[in-house]
Structures are given as C-alpha cells and as structure tokens.
Image (cartoon, rainbow, N blue to C red):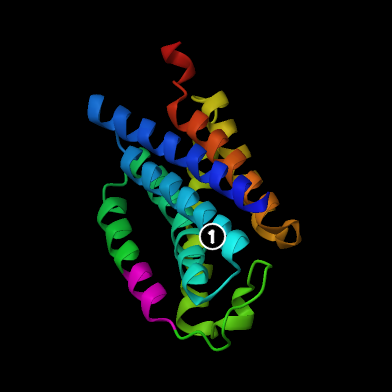
Amino acid sequence: MDALLGFAAMLVSLRLTAELLRRHRARPAPGLLAWAGALAAFALGSGALAWGAAAGWDDRSFRVYYLFGGLLAAALLGAGSLQYAGRRWAGPLALLYTGLAVGVALAMQITEPVTGDSIPEAQAHLELYPARVLAILGNGLGTIAAIAVALAGIRRRPLGNGLILAGLAVAAIGSTLAGLGEAGSALFSAAAAVLLYAGFVSRPASAR
C-alpha cells in the first residue's frame, strides 16, 4: 500500500508539472519553469518513496530521494518565487544550484549503507559537509524566499499566495513527520503539490 500511494503521489505531481509546462509554452511567465521543476522534484521524491517502500531502501533510492526531496524541491520553489517577483538573477542561480545539487547527490559519500524499510535519516548516512549543509541552505533560503514573496504580494493575490503559503506549510509538516512512513510522506507531498499548483495559477484579484 505504501508503494502504491507513493506512486500515486508521483503521478499527481507529474500531472501538475506537465500542466505548468503547458501554461509556460502557451504564455511564458516568470517563475513557471522553476515552479514546474519544483513540482517535478516533488514527483521524483515521491517516486523514491515508492521505490523504497516496494523494494526496501538502499543507497540508490536514498540518493534519488535526497536529491529531489532534500536538495531541489524547496530551492526551486524559492527561485520561482523570486523570478515571479522580478529578480532575473534567480534563474541563472537556480541552474547553477541544480547542477551543484546533482553533482553532490551523485558524489556524496554514504557513511553507513542504507537498508531497511523506513525512510532513511540523512544524519545517519551523510557527513554534515557538503550534502547536509547544502540541503540546509537550499531548503532554508528557498523556503524563506517563497514565504517572503508570498507575504509581500498577498494583498494583490490573497487566494493564490494564501494557497502557496498553505502548500509550504503542508510540505514542511510532511518533512518533519518522518514517522508517518512512505505513505504518509507521499500524501503530504501530493497535497503540498496540489496547493502550490493552485496558488501558482491563481490570478490576481484585480484580474478577476
């Protein structure tokens, strides 16, 4: 059941990713590509949860989960928000960070082999530097940027930015409740992706 729910959560996030890409092709707008990348990271993180639940966790599934769930999702959310707010430098910075995150995830030394049926804890398998430090920075700065932009524009887009803030809160709760297991984490991830997507595509109040 955990594997099925993780797979279902992956499909939900992938579908929302495809919809954001379709919107970008039809009418390019700042932030859409980075936000699509964030939802794709949610999808692949959920896929890793399904993999771990179905076959047991190992070093490979842990690397995938850590890359997309730990290093990329929040950072790309923040980059998309900064682009939406007119910060053009956020796009090149996001590309640079993504390349760095992929390199770190591939090269990071796993100090203890990953085994078992429960979601691995990063501190049990990774040194603090560089992987865990990069995750702390990417998650922290990305979340702060997304929250700051949403709060700054909430009067103009009360519904959309409120949904983004709700999505961020759901994602944060899901990441802190590791005891929920793969199914619970995947459901929180899917719920966050749905809320975030709804917030991204919501029009400003003045356009209604």
Expressed as whole percent of the image width and height from the top left, the position of residue 83 reads 33, 43
Circle 1: element type = helix
In the rendered image, the vertical position of residue 193 relative to residue 133, given as above or below:
above
Determine the residue located farthest toward the front in the rendered image: 55
Question: What's the residue type where badge 1 is placed?
Answer: Trp
Q: Quadrant of residue 203?
A: top left
Work out whether residue 140 or residue 45 is closer to the camera in this orientation and state it. Answer: 45
Most common secondary structure along the magenta stretch:
helix
Expressed as whole percent of the image width and height from the top left, the position of residue 79 reads 38, 50
Residue at 46% across, 72% down: 60
Determine the residue located farthest toward the bottom in the rendered image: 111
Query: Per the image, is 105 magenta?
Result: yes
Q: Which residue is mark 1?
A: 51
Expressed as whole percent of the image width and height from the top left, the position of residue 14 reads 43, 41
Query: Per the image, is 96 magenta?
Result: no
Q: Tell me, yes or no, if residue 143 can be seen here.
A: no
Residue 85 appears left or right of 59: left
Residue 64 appears left or right of 189: left
Magenta stretch in the rendered image:
100-108
Q: Tell me, yes or no, if residue 154 can be seen here.
A: yes
